[in-house]
Amino acid sequence: MSKILVAYFSQSGNTARAAEAVARAVGAKTYEIEPSEKYPADYNKCIAEAKREREADARPALKSSPAEAVKEADIVFLGYPIWWYDAPMLIYSFIDACDFKGKRVIPFATSGGSGMSGSDERIAKEAGVKKETGYISRFRLNVSEIEKWAKNAVG
């Protein structure tokens, strides 16, 4: 049986709720990806910071190393909000900090309206893994839908 980890970054709590649903559906542990310095709580300041990071292809520092948590997993569900038509740059910091050789990385994202915006392809490329069919939750999280997707994703 595969060991599954649900790693996620959540600014507002929506992606955290999605991650909890995925973890429940597949019987996985969760790992919260946290920046060493929190993003501003003010929406406009947060999106301005996210835009600066994206334009600079920045790799913000992580609060702690995820390497051990990821090392134990065969499958990593990776959750994040869509910011500026991509995963937050913190997600790429997470990818850089881990070895995904021989693992499946399955992305899921939350968004106020846009789709995966190619973030699933970029994540696969940066992690050095095969692209998996991701899940996008637009506007409102449908818990039963994401649970069904997660169960199907692991096979």
Image (cartoon, rainbow, N blue to C red):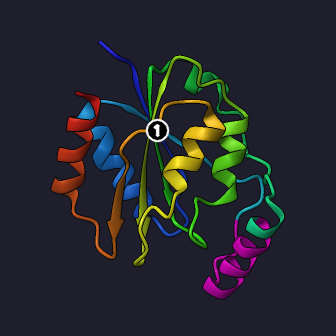
The local crowd at label 1, few if under 14, some if 14 to 19, many if 20 or more residues have their Cα within 10 Å, is: some
Name the residue located 43 percent from the left edge and 58 percent from the top edge. Answer: 109
| Magenta region includes residue 152 | no
Q: Relative to the observer, which residue lies in front, 67 or 134?
A: 134
Q: State the SS at label 1.
A: loop
Relative to 149, is 45 above or below? below
Point out residue 8 in the picture as x, y percentages from the top left corner.
51, 48
Q: Is residue 48 magenta?
A: yes
Residue 137 vertical position relative to residue 103 in the rendered view, above or below: below
> Is residue 124 toward the left or the right of residue 62 in the image?
left
Occupied quadrant, residue 47: bottom right
What residue is rendered at 80% in x and 49% in y? 61
Circle 1: residue type: Lys
For residue 137, above or below residue 7: below
Q: Determine the residue located farthest toward the bottom in the rendered image.
A: 44
The residue labelled by disc 1 is: 131
Q: Which residues are magenta?
A: 39-53
The quadrant of the picture occupied by the N terminus is top left
Q: Which percent across, then down, holds residue 62?
A: 74, 46
Quadrant location, the C terminus: top left
Please state which of residues 94 and 40 is positioned toward the viewer in this rendering.
94
Residue 59 falls left or right of residue 129: right
Q: Relative to residue 77, is residue 1 drawn left or right?
A: left
Residue 22 vertical placement versus 86 (above, below)? above
Residue 110, image x, y percentages: 41, 64
Residue at the top extreme? Answer: 1
| Residue 142 image-quadrant placement | bottom left
